[in-house]
Image: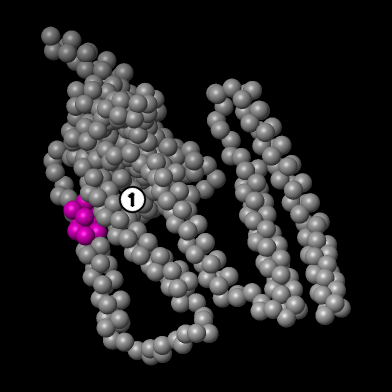
Amino acid sequence: MCTKIQNTKQLTKMGFRKLINSKKLLSFFAAFMLLGTNLLMAQTEAGGAAAGQAEAPKVDWTGVAYYVLIFFLICLGVAIVGKILKVYDLTLKMQGKKGLNWNTVMATICIVFLVAGLYGAYWSFTEQGSMTLPEAASEHGVKIDEMFTVTTILTMIVFFITQILLFTFLFRYRHSDKRRAHFLPHNNTIEKVWTIIPAIVLTILVVFGFFTWQKIMNSENLKEDINIDVTGHQFAWELRYPGKDGVLGPKDYTLVTGTNNLGVNFKKKASFDDLRVDTMYIPVNKSIRLNILAQDVIHSVYMPYFRVQLNAVPGLPTFFKFVPTITTAQMRSKLDDPKFEYTLYCNKICGGSHYNMQKVVRVVTEAEYQTWLSRQKPYLNDALRKELHFASANEQSNGSTNRLALNN
Ligand SMILES: [Cu+2]
């Protein structure tokens, strides 16, 4: 008996030695790296503070290394606990006692996983939930948000029920020598329940989505729509507004030149008063029709606050109609951010300078919109007049005064 205990002690010692020897170097390395990363992060923070607030925040890749290392440390910790349990189990067996009940260990781990996972879901909602967009600033955006909320609530109910059932069943019905499993080869009722319920829920969601999409996209073209051409190319958005006639001149890709970079056809009258603008001004509560085009690769018109997104595809003109409901000034006071701007982004990684594809969008009152519109420059600028061999704006105005003078 005495030798048996000694043997056990020796074995335990050997086990621990092995464990320490194999993990020692790795643990030291991990601790060293963690300390090093912390120092790096401290330096970045100090550097950022010294540089002042004017500089844009930089992506801190040392933070990623920090979390990767923490993950490896946790894995190492779990492995060490596992090894210790294994050694403890062996010790018990060598002492002639009953070893560890691994089924109970695994079942407990399942419950721990469930609790940690549920807390993770709660953390995700409370921490990252605030990162979602504020209220929709367009008519259809409210409907999209409703759809999103209903889908999230339904999927969350299913998520919580299934996860809690899965892990508690794993715990409750873990293997036990006192219990025999019931053999259930087939049950029609269960099959029907788990086929019909998801089918009904999914059908409701799909039909709901289908009708919402129909309402958004099947809008008629109205005379009072404000047509705006949004053309994407690497790496900028070009905006063209119709002039007083309210009609955009036609375009033809064969007419594209350095000066006429959108290929506007100036054989048509409607093209003459078109305007080229830099910031997209749109009047509140008016129907806006964006005519979306791309000249090289696929881009994507993305205006998150209006819940607008549509691809800009070369050779395939598309459009999106929406009604903005909150002015920039109103949104600024709502968000308590005097610098807030709505933005038009490109939502396709379309090349190296993709990030450049941004335009400020301002939602204003009708009066402000008209004032702004009257100040915009025509697409047909002097350089383009020269290229097309048109009389320049100055010559034309001089000509008309001369004619007036002659008539008098
Ligand atoms: Cu793009």
How many other residues sit within 10 Å of disc 1, few (<14), some (14-19) or many (≥20)? some
For residue 339, which quarter of the picture?
Answer: top left
Q: Amino acid at mark 1?
A: Leu
For residue 105, which quarter of the picture?
Answer: bottom right
> In this rendering, is residue 397 above or below 298?
above
Q: Is residue 333 left or right of residue 97?
A: left
Most common secondary structure along the magenta stretch? helix
Pick the residue in front: 132 or 91: 91
**Residue at horizontal 73%, vertical 81%?**
96
For residue 86, which quarter of the picture?
Answer: bottom right
Start-end of magenta stretch: 208-217
Q: Is residue 165 left or right of residue 216?
A: right
Question: Magenta stretch containing residue 2, yes or no?
Answer: no
> In this rendering, is residue 405 above or below 305?
above
**Residue at horizontal 52%, vertical 71%?**
107
**Residue at horizontal 48%, vertical 49%?**
350
Q: Position of residue 148 (x, y in %)?
A: 30, 53
Q: Secondary structure at mark 1?
A: strand
Residue 328 visible somewhere in the drawing: no
Q: Position of residue 77 (x, y in %)?
A: 67, 58
Q: Position of residue 144 (x, y in %)?
A: 26, 50
Residue 199 visible somewhere in the drawing: yes
Residue that label 1 marks: 310
**Residue at horizontal 75%, vertical 77%?**
95
Q: Is residue 393 left or right of residue 7?
A: left
Q: Position of residue 57 (x, y in %)?
A: 56, 33
Pick the residue in front: 183 or 254: 183
Question: Magenta stretch containing residue 216, yes or no?
Answer: yes
